[in-house]
Image (cartoon, rainbow, N blue to C red):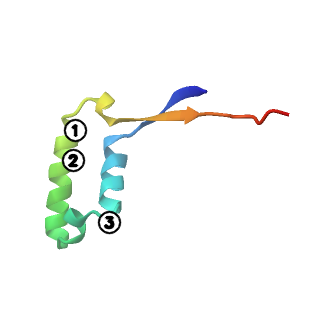
Amino acid sequence: MTAGELRYDWSPDRYLRYTEGCRNADFAARDDPSRADLRARLRRALDRLPQDAFRSRAPVVFALARRPA
């Protein structure tokens, strides 16, 4: 059995687009001006984070079994 890690480095822009596009109720329930305000506030908050805060990590595990001949 081997184990590894799947990594994905997001950018603040890509993360914001992903968050907004996931049928997020906070975005969907707002009118355009309110949605733009939420987007701007979230963008300012994301800009304060270090780049490594945007690294997604998920364990990858692979196991192979063989039946005896």
Residue 29, placed above or below residue 21? below
Give SS at disc 2. helix
The residue mark sitting in front, 3 or 1, is: 3
User: Type of residue at label 1?
Assistant: Asp
The crowding category of the residue bearing disc 1, from other C-alpha atoms within 10 Å (few below 14, some 14 to 19, many at least 20), is few
How far, Cα to Cα, is label 3 from label 1?
A: 23 Å
Residue 50, placed above or below residue 44? above
The crowding category of the residue bearing disc 3, from other C-alpha atoms within 10 Å (few below 14, some 14 to 19, many at least 20), is few
Q: Position of residue 39 (x, y in %)?
A: 21, 56
* Residue corresponding to mark 1: 47
How far, Cα to Cα, is label 2 from label 1?
A: 6 Å
* Residue corresponding to mark 2: 43
Depth check: 18 or 65 in front? Answer: 65
Residue at image location 27% in from the left, 62% down from the top:
24
Residue at image location 29% in from the left, 32% down from the top:
53
Residue at image location 38% in from the left, 40% down from the top:
10
Q: Quadrant of residue 66?
A: top right
Q: Position of residue 11 (x, y in %)?
A: 36, 40
Label 2 or label 3, whichever comes before in sequence order: 3
Residue 65, which numbered label? none
How far, Cα to Cα, is label 2 from label 3?
A: 18 Å
* Residue corresponding to mark 3: 23
Q: Position of residue 65 (x, y in %)?
A: 69, 34
| CB-based contact (under 8 Å), mark 2 and mark 1 | yes
The crowding category of the residue bearing disc 2, from other C-alpha atoms within 10 Å (few below 14, some 14 to 19, many at least 20), is some
